[in-house]
Amino acid sequence: MESPHEQDVLFAGGFICGWDDDSNSPRTATTTGVSRRQARRNASCLHPPDTPDEMDSSASEASYSGDEADLTDTTEYAPVGSICDIHNLYQSKDRDGLWVKELPQDLPPPSETSESNQYALVARHKRCYDGRRNLKLHSIFVQSNHLKNFLAGVLEGYSGLTLTLNRVKFHEPFRPFVQRWERLLKARSEVADPEIKAHVDLLYRLLKEELGSTIAQKEDLLKNGVITYEFLDLIFEPGDLVFSNVEGHPRAFIFNSGEFENDSYSPKFYMSCQYIGLRGQKFSYMSTFLKIPWFEGTLAITSLPVFPFAYHKEQSTIKAALIARGALWETYKGYHYKQYDGPINVDYLYGAVELHLKGRIVIDAESYNTFTRAASTSGVGEVLFDELDDEKRMLATSTLLGYALKNKRWTTFQLDGVKDIVWDDRAFDSLVLPHSEHNMKRLILALTRSQSKGGVSFDDVITGKGRGMIFLLRGPPGVGKTLTAESVAEVMRVPLYVLSAADLGITASQLEDKMKRTLELIPRWGAVLLLDEADVFMEARDSTDLERNELVAIFLRLLEYYEGILFLTTNRAENIDPAFESRIHVSIRFPDLNHASRRQIWKQFIGQANMERFSDDQLERISEVNLNGRQIKNVIRTAHLLAHDEGSPLNFEYVETVLNLRVPGDGCL
């Protein structure tokens, strides 16, 4: 859009401007209309009349008053776009540049009428203030069918152009012609028909005069493999493949359009691009923006943050690598439970922060889009694909969408950080349960496996109720409640989705919303759900606390319709609401660890490789210390760090040193 000071009145200068074939200099003739006889001559691509005498004299006296021009004009005009000439228009300034509702008294006649429709080209000119010329080309309207057919070949595949329109408009800075100049020259040299050649030459001369300097500068820059900031838009053509490194990973995009943002503090060239991403269970073109900051002088094209793929020095190598990565990325459609070691971006109050994550993840783009704000992210149109070819694999993103189980966050993962999980097959066997519950491990494993396979279907009286398997693990901290749920998930090889009271909120609406979303997600992943320290939602109801009663009621109702495996842990079993007893299938009480249990836990954490450095007497001594399982783990971890710092293997002396650092009565390390 033109700026306010350029919103000037366009008027017809009353000239037909052509070129003398010998001198290549412009020549003009005053006119307001062309007779049919003269039009036939011009339609045959003869030069337009050189003098006003050859015009229809009656046409020169036609008057104009707004829309009445076409109603009163009886002049017969040539077919649209048939006269091989340019109809020139010029822009002038009004007095104040304001819009008014009164019709100006000095309104000039319309500049584009049936007269202008006769010409192959309509060229609009406006004043120029660069000190080198008085006028510059504002826009071109192509009306000649010969030219439209010619340009259809030259500009084939150039997005944003429809060359079948009656009038095709090109606006400064005429990027399509600058970018396809070599192709235009080649196509021009191949035109054999004299009539078509005359129309093509007309356009060529107009463009050459206006763009010659720009084209010469561009060619000089490209010959040297460099570019200036001002010429960036001339090396990116819509539909081109472009290359960029995004967060250290090579990426390919399709360039759509570019625009200079002339911010006085940080000017930049913004680029609208496309890539292939996942939209639910299907692939789709997605939109993104890349940018090139302002720079002074010239830069090598390949040193730009984004540059045309055609300039890459190792095109075949990088193309093969991108296709291979895209093929791997394609296999992660749907749900996948994996190990991850790499960066993630986490949104905090003041923006995104990059963190390093090493842990289990769930890759699930469909759920990511459902449970995050990204659900509203728009793709490009509605073009969806079930599979990708190599061309689209090359455009695939390098990231995967999913959930970080450790951080409890939806985020993006780098493809090269995703690995297969190395399962700990000894996790369940090494689980230490109370001696009185020695058959409980077998029961837990049998129930959870049967539930996950769906081998036994048993409904409540009301369909859909009572299909889940709910375990209550009760006891003091550090006795193995959480580890039990972790071990079950490990042996079943499914995700463990952990929630605490803090994650579920403190109001009834927060609890219901979070639980509904969770209970919708867990069956999709086949995950085990652990609600850690769920006391606040299970505590016996009190007639004086209506708000908490509502929380308990909602929690009870949601449990009735849960269809998966759920572990509830509590430190205050004596305060549980009686209504939960009928919802819980298995209840396990974990007492404080006794000497034998502590000894077994010490042996597991010390590990087989280090046990030879611990005598039975030393193992007995540390087992006498009244610690829970979590505290024993922390002692071993601290002792390991101390031994590593001194370059020695773990032994009893390091463990004893850490134990002696405990503050008496503190109860923790």
Image (cartoon, rainbow, N blue to C red):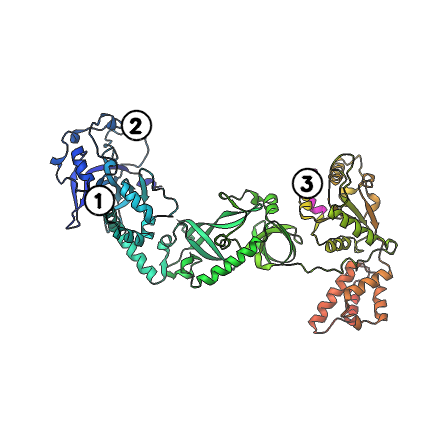
Residue at image position (68%, 38%) is 509
Quadrant position of the N terminus in the picture: top left
Residue 437 at what x, y percent from top left? 86, 53
Give the left or right position of residue 158, taking residue 411 as reference: left
Q: Are marks 1 and 3 in contact (CB under 8 Å)?
A: no
Crowd band around label 1 with a 10 angstrom C-alpha radius: few (<14), some (14–19), many (20+): some
Query: Judging from the image, what secondary structure is the residue with disc 1 in?
Result: helix
Query: Judging from the image, what secondary structure is the residue with disc 2 in?
Result: loop
Pick the front one: 527 or 392: 392
The outermost residue toward the left is: 53
Report the residue marked by disc 2.
102
- Amino acid residing under circle 1: Glu
Residue 298 at what x, y percent from top left? 36, 60
Which dot marks residue 195? Answer: 1
Q: What residue span does the magenta drawing correspond to?
A: 500-517
Give the left or right position of residue 537, taking residue 155 as reference: right
Q: CA distance from mark 1 to mark 3?
A: 73 Å
Q: Are marks 3 and 2 in contact (CB under 8 Å)?
A: no
Residue 457 at what x, y percent from top left? 76, 42
Pick the front one: 474 or 401: 401
Residue 623, quarter of picture: bottom right
Report the residue marked by disc 3.
516
Residue 147 at what x, y percent from top left? 28, 44
Residue 32, quarter of picture: top left
Q: Earlier in the sequence, mark 3 or mark 2?
A: 2
- Amino acid residing under circle 2: Glu
Give the left or right position of residue 508, taking residue 180 as reference: right
Q: CA distance from mark 3 to mark 2?
A: 63 Å
Residue 486, quarter of picture: bottom right
Q: How many marks?
A: 3
